[in-house]
Image: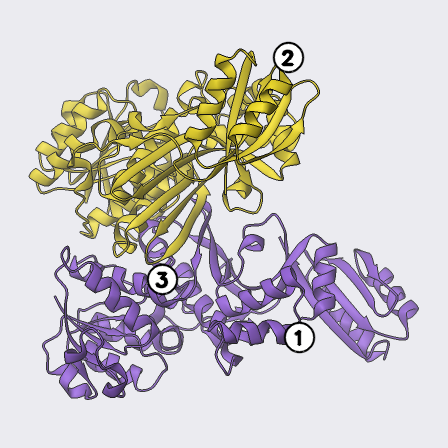
Chain colours: A purple, B yellow
Amino acid sequence: MRIGILGYGTVGSGLIDIIDKNKDKKNIEIVSILVRDKSKYEGINHYDKLTTDIEEIFSKNLDVLVEVMGGLYPSLEYIKRALKSKINVVTANKDLLAESGDELLKLAKDNNVSIKFEASVGGGIPVLKPLIESLEGNNINSICAILNGTTNFILSKMYNEGLSYNEALKQAQELGFAEANPDSDVLGYDAARKLSILSTLAYDNRVYWKDLYLEGITNIDEKDIEYAKKLNCKIKLVGQSKYEDNKVSGFVRPVLVGSNSILANIENEFNAVVLNGDSVGEVSFVGKGAGKLATGSAVYGDVMDILNNRISSIDSFTKEKVDVNKVLDENCSALLRFKSNHKDEIFSVLKEKIKNYDILNEDEELAVLVYANSEIEINDILSEIQNKGYCSQVNKLIKIN
Amino acid sequence: MRIGILGYGTVGSGLIDIIDKNKDKKNIEIVSILVRDKSKYEGINHYDKLTTDIEEIFSKNLDVLVEVMGGLYPSLEYIKRALKSKINVVTANKDLLAESGDELLKLAKDNNVSIKFEASVGGGIPVLKPLIESLEGNNINSICAILNGTTNFILSKMYNEGLSYNEALKQAQELGFAEANPDSDVLGYDAARKLSILSTLAYDNRVYWKDLYLEGITNIDEKDIEYAKKLNCKIKLVGQSKYEDNKVSGFVRPVLVGSNSILANIENEFNAVVLNGDSVGEVSFVGKGAGKLATGSAVYGDVMDILNNRISSIDSFTKEKVDVNKVLDENCSALLRFKSNHKDEIFSVLKEKIKNYDILNEDEELAVLVYANSEIEINDILSEIQNKGYCSQVNKLIKIN
């Protein structure tokens, strides 16, 4: 089978290593690799296959085009051209799928070829294929996941080693887990894109990533960690979505997670996806969410599926975008932290309006764990407290089970 | 697609429920169901399809035969007949695969049909398909797994609720998690069969279940649980195998598991499989290891693969059985418990022969956690202690990371 590869960066080189390692067993021929600057790669494996000219890639009569250069442009254009030319596509590009999955899946279908994207969610973890194929008999009710290794690394360091957010971010950058501009990770965009891909496949409804409630980890501080420990919880950037009564709800946000839950024990660069299906119950998938060989492993698996003609048809991306509920419409508890000179007034509001609460701190700041009938109830109380001028600042951290 | 089903018990009825639930989406026609006694099923769905005559099943021009009646006989014979008749087979039967996988996979290949068996390992958890297909680019180095829900339930109850082994077993039986004769579960046979299937697929070498080191949970008592808690560990019946330098090692036995590890947090009837691949690193799969709908979900996934013509060829079962090393040939620690009136003599042996040890108890019995260069070293010391008559009884529980 003849494959072309767009990009020879981290994932591309991982994939090429795996192809080379398996070359006696599998009939895959790398015929062309697109790079920006050939001079960077002198002496590297397959140097003779490098090109800076996309036309050369498309002149090679490919069976599969692998896109591992990332970003929306020009990836989108190249992938569309491949699909229109009836070339199968494998991509690790979550941005592209989250943004243009509808267009790409439709093009693939119209041209009777496949586009596969296991590596776009959870890096090396096999999760999309099990979801689409193995769990096909299930209606998936919910997804609860840690989908971004960078933020999980930062939160692990803050929790386990007492680092501040900035110190942990710096360490992540030094180790190559975080980019120089970390916004896409720490603001939750990356996780939201992945959650939207998972949710779209799971609920057979197009869930658009910008419709999810989104909150990053940049406001998490040492005090939050301290309270989390008091509550026997961890703090994790969690992507959660649910499908109930034909309605989707979903968020990506930092939350308190009880320490016995599977997500609480996912540390550093690891990712985890917990699916709940009506037949299978709760199934979890855990592994490295990024990295050269881990992601390469997922891309290679997709290439193998195409080589072996193992096809699954996916209709969910081409459906209309659904409305997404952004607040928790169920019993929920939350850590609330107030900077306030009116603590007694806040207590009065809590006593009157909330089911129950525990006080964690009332010295330097007021910190309470409240138990409410829904997040809306909590938000209403916070509005009231702020509107009445009882506090200058408030932080809210939902606790999930 | 026309399917016949052998058995209408727990798994069979789960499968049928799932087929019925999805019947508007998928083109599966149940044409015949083999049962032992039709009168038991009056009024049930598909009653008109029931038969007690295997010839009727084979007269129906089936595309797929699903075997969910369990046991070796007559299942083996029926499945062989189906394969020879060029009918695809889906089975949940780990006994059959572990015992006769070589014969069955060869028959399938020779007749150009598939035999699929996702439900045979880990119940509803998608694990064989991810291992075979998604992780195809990896050499798998090790497997570490909880593969039997009954024993995990018993050990969870003993640890979390202070029940004795017999009380916990009784509760498992009352709840339907354990059979009247629980030997296959509590002696570790069931887990060993599953581990052999996983290991065969993972290492591309036939690993026969009787070649694994095997030890059940029947000797675990309250004292073991007490020491485990002291050591911040759980006790789990773990199936572990490794592939190093072309050699396989493997065991199923109760072990101490550090409380932060993923296996330590798998409770009750849940199962978990942790694979380590040379590209992907550590990936874990967690979910319900048994149950009507969970197992039905896995069987349904296999049926869907056949319906969609998603085939993977498996050669490992037909290879020659490999030798399996039964002891841990690496640094290892173990809890040793001695009934002894010669404690000082035992300490002398330990001081002379072992790297290091911690004393957990020296009052009623002598309990130590020893750190050794290998399990062989530990076994040699135990031989010496017993040969010299220093103890009347010794219990050994390995600790894994």
Kindly tell me whether residue A242 is visible in this rendering: yes
Give me the chain letter of mark 1. Answer: A
Give me the chain letter of mark 2. Answer: B
Give me the chain letter of mark 3. Answer: A
Task: Say if labels 3 and 1 share a chain.
Answer: yes
- The residue lying toward the viewer, choosing from A135 and A189, is A189
Vertical arrangement, residue B238 with respect to residue B388, above or below: below
Mark 3 Cα shell of 10 Å, populated few (<14), some (14-19), many (≥20): many
Front tag of 2 and 3: 2
Please give the name of the residue rendered at 64% of the width and 12% of the height, measured from the top-left corner: B341
Give how far across and how far down residue A236 sits, in percent. 59, 62
* Residues at marks 2 and 1, CA–CA distance in whole angstroms: 62 Å
Please give the name of the residue rendered at 21% of the width and 60% of the height, measured from the top-left corner: A21
**What residue did someone put label 2 on?**
B341
Give the secondary structure at mark 1.
loop
Relative side of A289 to B362, left or right:
left
Mark 1 Cα shell of 10 Å, populated few (<14), some (14-19), many (≥20): few
Q: Amino acid at mark 2?
A: Asn
**What residue did someone put label 1 on?**
A219
Name which quarter of the figure residue A255 lies in: bottom right
Figure quadrant of the N terminus of chain A: bottom left
Task: Decide which of tag 3 and tag 1 comes sooner along the chain.
Answer: 1
Q: Are marks 3 and 1 in contact (CB under 8 Å)?
A: no
Vertical arrangement, residue A264 with respect to residue A394, above or below: above
**What residue did someone put label 3 on?**
A294
- The residue lying toward the viewer, choosing from B186 and A351, is B186
